[in-house]
Image (cartoon, rainbow, N blue to C red):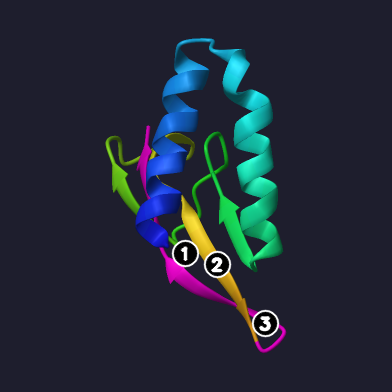
Amino acid sequence: MEAIINQLFEIEKKATEQNLDIFERNLNRIQHELEELGYKIINPIGNQYDERDASIEANILNPSAKKITKVLKPVIYKMQNDNYILLQKGIVIVE
């Protein structure tokens, strides 16, 4: 399922970059269905980078950088036994 979520994330990212709003409703519906299945997908773009955050692997382009400027893979959690478990670490670029 992570592979499907990653592909949907890429489609959503490309649609946003190209200002293709025609897919927004469909992508939101898929996101809702994934949440109903117990998945939580987090896109940390624009967040402040915290090296203590175990859910993210970062490529830091500038040692003084603090902001996540690009997300290559989202953070994916799955609900199991009333708790979210980390399925995939987010892979980000910090500039």
Residue at image mark 2 = 77
Q: Nearer the viewer, mark 3 or mark 1?
A: 3
Relative image position of residue 21 (x, y in whole percent): 61, 15
Q: Amino acid at mark 1?
A: Ser
Q: Is residue 65 visible?
A: no
Asked which secondary structure carries label 1, the reply is loop
52 up-or-down from 59: above or below = below
Relative image position of residue 24 (x, y in whole percent): 64, 25
Q: Nearer the viewer, residue 86 or 92?
A: 86
Residue at image mark 1 = 55
4 up-or-down from 29: above or below = below
Task: State how far apart marks 3 and 2 are (Cα).
Answer: 9 Å
Which of the two discs, 3 and 1, labels the residue nearer the N terminus? 1
Q: Nearer the viewer, residue 51 or 70?
A: 70
39 up-or-down from 29: above or below = below
Magenta stretch in the rendered image: 81-95
- Horizontal side of residue 94 vs 67, given as left or right: left
Q: Any magenta on residue 72?
A: no
Q: Nearer the viewer, residue 19 or 22?
A: 22
Q: Amino acid at mark 3?
A: Asn
Q: Which mark is residue 83?
A: 3
Asked which secondary structure carries label 3, the reply is strand
Q: How many marks?
A: 3
Which of the two discs, 2 and 1, labels the residue nearer the N terminus? 1
